[in-house]
Amino acid sequence: MRHQNHNLSFKLTKNQRLLNSHQFKQVFDACDKKIHSENLLVFIKENSMDNCRLGMAITKKKLKNATDRNRLKRLIREYFRLNQYCICGIDIVVIVKQKYDKKINIHDQLSQLFSKIIQHYPNKDN
């Protein structure tokens, strides 16, 4: 997605991430919406901030190989980073639902998930 404003920063800073277990617990306990794909589950909770925040819970149990876990995390962060100005005011936690086969096209699932998130929680400034 292309943005007209050239002053936008597409960095992913600390205030755009869920950093501790208390923040994750808040999202899991008071989740406003869940969005599913075949292998991923996204928990969404509205926050009182102007920006959205991302958290990931990708466990060894679901994805054994560390390089596969790290690749998936990089992909999720990249989708979030590129779409961060299309959504605002929510906390997002992404988890792997079931054993994940790296042959699956995860790009399609992430694209569908972020499209649904943007549809439900659009940035009012755009």
Image: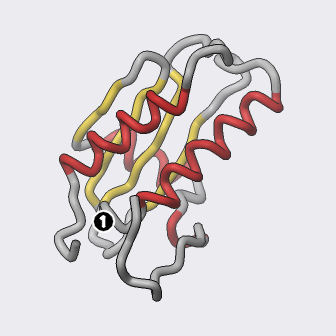
- Image coordinates of residue 37 in percent, x first then y, are 38, 23
Q: Residue 115's image quarter?
A: top left
Residue that extends furthest to the bottom in the rendered view of this protein? 7
Q: Is residue 87 left or right of residue 100?
A: left
- Image coordinates of residue 99 in percent, x first then y, are 61, 11
What amino acid is at disc 1? Cys
Mark 1 lies on residue: 88
Element type at marker 1?
loop
Instruction: Look at the image and name its color scheme.
Output: secondary structure
The residue positioned 81% from the left and 22% from the top of the image is 65
Pick whichever, 78 or 39, lies toward us: 78
* CA neighbours of label 1 inside 10 A, class few (<14), some (14 to 19), many (20+): many
Quarter containing the N terminus: bottom left
Q: Is residue 46 left or right of residue 38?
A: left
- Image coordinates of residue 20 in percent, x first then y, are 59, 56
Pick whichever, 16 or 86, lies toward us: 86
Pick whichever, 41 or 72, lies toward us: 72
Q: Is residue 70 above or below residue 3?
A: above
Q: Residue 51's image quarter?
A: bottom left
The residue positioned 26% from the left and 56% from the top of the image is 46
Q: How many marks do you count on the picture?
A: 1
Quarter containing the C terminus: bottom left
The residue positioned 52% from the left and 33% from the top of the image is 107
Q: Is residue 82 above or below residue 60?
A: below
Q: Is residue 51 above or below residue 38?
A: below
The residue positioned 72% from the left and 37% from the top of the image is 71
